Every structure is written in C-alpha cells, then in structure tokens.
Amino acid sequence: MPETQRIVINTAPLIALVAALGDLTVLPSLYTQVFVPFEVCQEILAGGSSGFAVAEFETATWLQKQQTPLNISPLLLNSLDRGEAAVIQLAINENIQTVCIDEVAGRRIARLSGLSVTGSIGVLL
C-alpha cells in the first residue's frame, strides 16, 4: 500500500465532501497533511454563483493551502484543466504519492505520472 499520510486534493472532491458531509473534517482524520494547490484554492474561492463550499474551505485552517501559483508542465496543461494539472504538479514537486481527483482524465494522467489516486468516493468509503 502506498504511503497515504499526505495527499494533494482537487476542487471537485472538496466540493463533493462538503455536499456529502457538510464539512471537510473527514480529511484530517485520514491524512496527516492535506495540500491544496494555489490554483485549486482560486477555483474554490471563486465559488460559482452560489458560493457553495467556500465557507467550509475557508474555516478548514488545517488545510495546507499553497500561497503561490505553480510552474505547471505544459504537458499537464495541454491534457487537463488547471486545477487537476496543479494537483499532479504539486504532488510531483513535493514527492507526495497520493492525489485526490474525481475526473477520469486527471486520474489517468496521475497514474501515468506514477501517483496513487483516490477520489471523493474513496475518501468517503
């Protein structure tokens, strides 16, 4: 089993966890460190028309929210949206073995990059 003490998480799983559980507190019970790339922070804080999950995200002070944008590989950016690409790039940069991505293309590229993948359903289970 890959080391899963640290994880990098994408936007969709964060929103899905808030939708399913009402907050994000399940994450620190499963992982010692949960990293959120700057690009994912920006997506969450944009909040869409309803601002769903923004308050829960902001109050989760234990999240390792990255403060600066990443220099993302063009290969990742050509295949994925900015959030998914940032999750994979941060995991590679910081030698974090596990990512949480729900989208099929992102999961495929993460596996091809040698990363272990889970999603919002995996976290809930």
Image: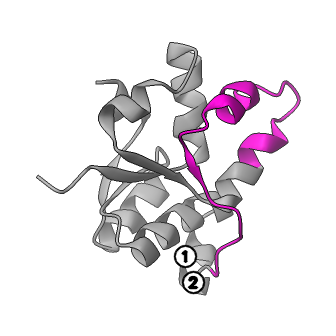
Give the residue displayed 30% in from the left and 63% down from the top.
97
Q: Residues within 10 Å of mark 2 (few under 14, many from 20)?
A: few
59 lies left or right of 45: left
Amino acid type, residue under disc 2 in the picture: Ser
57 above or below 66? above
Left or right for 100, reference 17: left
- For the C terminus, which image quadrant? top left
Residue type (three-letter) at the residue carrying disc 1: Leu
Q: Nearer the viewer, residue 53 or 84?
A: 53
Q: Is residue 95 left or right of residue 85?
A: left
Residue 55 is inside the magenta segment: yes
The residue nearer to you, when weighing 78 against 114, is 114
User: Where 39 sits versus 112, above or below?
Assistant: above
Vertical side of 12 occupied by 96: above or below = below
Q: Quadrant of residue 68?
A: bottom right
**Dot 2: element:** loop
The residue that disc 2 covers is 73
Q: Which residues are magenta?
A: 43-71
The percent coordinates of residue 8 (x first, y second) are 45, 54
Q: Position of residue 90 (x, y in %)?
A: 50, 69
The stretch drawn in magenta includes residue 17: no
Q: Marks 2 and 1: in contact by CB < 8 Å?
A: yes
Q: Residue at x 56, y 59 (%)?
A: 84
Callout 1: 10 Å neighbours few (<14), some, many (20+)? some
Residue named by callout 1: 76
